[in-house]
Image (cartoon, grey):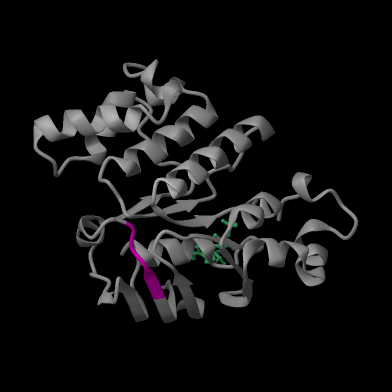
């Protein structure tokens, strides 16, 4: 059910601006991989490239086969992307967003999938008819994740899902991510809550200025002096720190 991702020498940018300068990254099938790093490191650009939203060069493979070039073909291969900032339509309801997430499925399958996905998010189940613009920040983020799940992704890429949320909602959201991982979805998580992200990651990557500067099992990186000093503040409370 899950899928592996292998990235070698990925370069991408915007016009003449090169942002990613040769990224190597491995995501094992069924793994939970975290990517952390300071603002502007290129984390969002990495996910955009892997979703086909910007051009890139390099060798990227899903289960050993080359990544297709277009966003629709990438979704069809089982890759879901929850973009930074959620990208919801304020005037559309919860149900309409979910239906949009499975536009390629015939109506009957779409309705069944909607029930399956909404079962993961009790908060959304109670709010099917509510407009996205009137949901709380945490509910909006759950809707963005639920919409991506409608296409049954085998690899889910999440870009800072906890951005701007209160600590309790951050915990609730990251619990959803862990549950999807336990259900067998391969996860590539970009997160600004470094301590929590590393603690739950099988493998983690630290990016700076378009390059990977360290990698290792999440908990090992969390314990490393370099990562603690750079991202958590020496002697600080790891669970309260962000990049
Ligand atoms: P953050 O944690 O702040 O979201 P990030 O690690 O996700 O940062 P990116 O958003 O990928 O970083 O940005 C990397 C670099 O690319 C930055 O210097 C940014 O200014 C630049 N950049 C991002 N989007 C564009 C764009 N559409 N056009 C031009 N430059 C861009």
- Using the image as rendered, state which of residue 194 and residue 43 is in the foreground: 194
In this rendering, position of residue 171 left or right of residue 140:
right
The answer to whether residue 214 shows anywhere in this view is yes
Question: Could you tell me which residue is drawn at 59 percent across and 43 percent down?
Answer: 163
Quarter residue 109 falls in: top left
**Is 3 a magenta residue?**
yes
The span picked out in magenta is 2-6
Residue 191 picture location, percent across and down: 59, 53
The answer to whether residue 18 shows anywhere in this view is no
Q: Main secondary structure of the magenta part?
A: loop
Question: Could you tell me which residue is drawn at 45 percent across and 34 percent down?
Answer: 142
In this rendering, position of residue 219 left or right of residue 182:
right
Question: Could you tell me which residue is drawn at 24 percent across and 70 percent down?
Answer: 69
In this rendering, position of residue 119 left or right of residue 239:
left
Question: Could you tell me which residue is drawn at 56 percent across and 62 percent down?
Answer: 202
Residue 7 picture location, percent across and down: 41, 76
Residue at far right of view? 235
């Amino acid at each position: 059910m899950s899928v592996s991702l292998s990235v070698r020498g990925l370069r991408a940018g915007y016009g003449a601006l090169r942002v990613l300068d040769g990224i190597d990254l491995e995501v094992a099938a069924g793994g939970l991989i975290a990517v952390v790093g300071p603002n502007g490191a290129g984390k969002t650009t990495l996910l955009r490239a892997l979703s086909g939203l910007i051009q890139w060069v390099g060798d990227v493979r899903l289960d050993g086969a080359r990544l297709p070039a277009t966003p629709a073909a990438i979704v069809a291969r089982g890759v879901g992307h929850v973009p930074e900032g959620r990208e919801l339509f304020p005037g559309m309801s919860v149900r309409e967003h979910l239906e949009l997430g499975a536009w390629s499925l015939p109506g009957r399958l779409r309705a069944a999938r909607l029930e399956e996905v909404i079962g993961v998010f009790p908060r959304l189940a109670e709010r099917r008819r509510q407009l996205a613009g009137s949901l709380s920040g945490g509910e909006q983020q759950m809707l963005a994740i639920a919409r991506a799940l409608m296409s049954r992704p085998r690899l889910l890429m999440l870009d800072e899902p906890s951005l701007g949320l209160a600590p309790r909602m951050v915990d609730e959201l990251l619990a959803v991510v862990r549950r999807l991982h336990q259900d067998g979805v391969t996860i590539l998580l970009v997160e600004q809550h470094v301590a929590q992200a590393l603690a739950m990651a099988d493998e983690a990557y630290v990016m700076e200025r378009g390059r990977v500067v360290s990698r290792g099992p999440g908990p090992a990186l969390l314990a490393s002096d370099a990562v603690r000093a750079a991202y958590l503040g020496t002697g600080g409370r790891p669970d309260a720190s962000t990049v």
